[in-house]
Image (spheres, grey):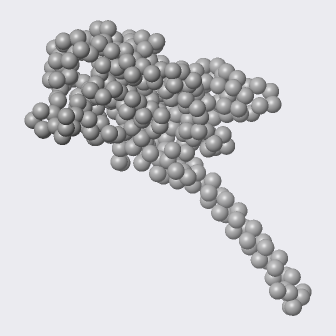
Amino acid sequence: MSNNTDASMKPDIQSIVDRIRTGKATRIVVLTGAGISTGAGIPDFRSPNTGLYDKLAPLRLPYPEAIFHINYFSHTPEPFYAIARARHPGNLKPTITHAFLALLAKKNLLHFVFTQNIDGLEQDAGIPPEKVLWAHGNWKSQHCYKCKSSYPDDLMNKAIRAGEVPYCLETGCGGAVKPDVVFFGQALPVEFEEKEKEVLEADLMLVMGTSLRVAPCSRLPGLVKEGIPRVLINNEKSGDLGNRAEDVCILGSCDDGVRRLADALGWGDDLNNLWKEAVAAKKHDETFEGGPSLDECIEKLASGMKDKMNVSDGHKRMLENHLNNKLGQIIAKDPTYS
């Protein structure tokens, strides 16, 4: 059979709805990225102008991802903590997309979720922890990156609130404390290789809010068996989603996409009710109340870096003048010096 499916025969939302209603999709596997949390107020990484990496431009990092690379963090943790308060999910609420995944679990349709996010909002929405792999870790705990000693939550929150780097309390260590999130250059949780086998069990896969540019999570959609629908809910095409005859692409924001899907399934009221419950249940933490915006954090850090650079430049000029004066004195005493 040819893969050149006629456009009029291309599967759409209704085909996915029919598959779920007829019981052909009872093991739904999900891969999520930053796009499912933008509705909570967390910028994604790569969107032009609004994404985090574009916003970091004033810091003149070696490359934008350096702020999340363990090698850079090991000697320069200040930029990470300068924006930590604005990125911390402390008082952020689950989005309608998080609630949709919780609804799938409630209806016994959710097989497993792989999330690349570190905000932990999946758990806040009510998704059973045993059905989620936080592939890049989350903010729920922290350890010294150097000696791996644990660090108290209250001191961590205090440091984040102040925008300061917390350092290890162990005598003689001095390593910077890092939340238990996976940085570039660090290995993913050991469970990843075992859990990725869950994709082979999928009878439907949802890929939501991800550019599919970061390995190894980017390889997961390719593990879905031929003939099994893969549904992309994202602002734009990503990976090879849309290349298979059975793929369905719902382009736009994740929240809009899941609302369309929920309404088509007749779950609109269930989804709204579950979302309201999840939002109401999220405990308020005064630690992260009224903090600076991400732009303000970046501007403050950039200004501080500029001040340091100015001091360095002034010191450099002072040394150059001093050396020139010394050289002039040497030449005056010995005109043959060159």
- The image quadrant that residue 204 belongs to is top left
- The image quadrant that residue 182 belongs to is top right
**Which is more toward the observer, 73 or 288?**
73
Q: Where is residue 85 in the image (x, y as percent from the top left)?
A: 50, 32
- The image quadrant that residue 19 belongs to is top left
Q: Residue furthest right?
A: 333
Q: Where is residue 76 in the image (x, y as percent from the top left)?
A: 64, 43
Q: Position of residue 38 (x, y in %)?
A: 35, 32
Left or right? Give the position of 129 relative to 208: right
**Which is more toward the observer, 132 or 91?**
132
For the point 66% across and 22% down, which residue is it? 151
Location of the C terminus by quadrant is: bottom right
Question: Is residue 253 visible from the viewing direction of this image?
Answer: no
For the point 90% across and 86% down, which residue is it? 333
Question: Is residue 198 visible from the viewing direction of this image?
Answer: yes
For the point 67% across and 21% down, which residue is it? 150
